[in-house]
Image (cartoon, helix red, strand yellow):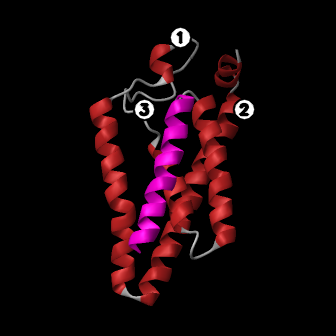
Amino acid sequence: NLLRKVNSSPKISNCLKFCSYFSVIFSVCAYIWLLVQRYSVSRLDAVLLILASGIPFVTVSIFRKLFNAPRPYQIYDFYEKKPKSKLGSSFPSRHVFSIFLIGTLMLEASLPLSVILFLLGILLSVCRVLLGMHFIRDVLTGALVGILSGVIGILVL
């Protein structure tokens, strides 16, 4: 089984973790850059960007807590070491949601940066599934809700 092999190999799992961390850090830096760009136009634009990203983020966080879907490592026994001690809150993936939301909001400011974020979002999705943090449905839903929230955010902005 691929997941068993990935999780029993420290080199592979460390590489996936590195890619995951890099994707998240890059997306946070891109968001800060976008926020600075908006702030340089007007403070209202910066506030609208915070609302356009913050409201969906809080909504997804509340939904995850209420739905409380188990994570793959809670269900399957092929993990020699559990990736995290955290239980539940798997659906949808908030990391994937966030990177696709930021990538969508970035479309107006920088198409190349937006494309990089979408590619990193795909990489992040694969890493989260292979590490046993999320099911495929979690990352797909996170990506779709992130893109939809970003489109709504662009319309608001």
Which is more foreground, mark 2 or mark 1? 1
- Amino acid carrying label 3: it is Ser
Asked whether residue 98 appears in the rendered view, the answer is no
How far is mark 2 from mark 3, CA to CA? Answer: 25 Å
Q: Nearer the viewer, mark 3 or mark 1?
A: 3
Label 3 sits on a secondary structure element that is loop
Residue flagged by tag 1: what amino acid is it?
A: Asp
Residue 14 picture quarter:
top right
49 to 102, vertically: above or below? below
Residue type for callout 2 = Lys
Q: Closer to the N terminus: mark 2 or mark 3?
A: 2
Q: Quadrant of the N terminus?
A: top right
Please tell me whether mark 2 sits on a helix, a strand or a loop.
helix
Q: Position of residue 112 (x, y in %)?
A: 69, 69
The furthest residue to the bottom: 41
Q: What residue would you read off at disc 2?
A: 11
Q: Position of residue 148 (x, y in %)?
A: 47, 54
Kindly report the secondary structure that dominates the magenta region of the rendered protein.
helix
Q: Viewer-nearest of labels 2 and 3?
A: 3
Q: Circle 1 is placed at which residue position?
A: 77
Q: Magenta stretch containing residue 108, yes or no?
A: no
Is residue 148 highlighted in magenta?
yes
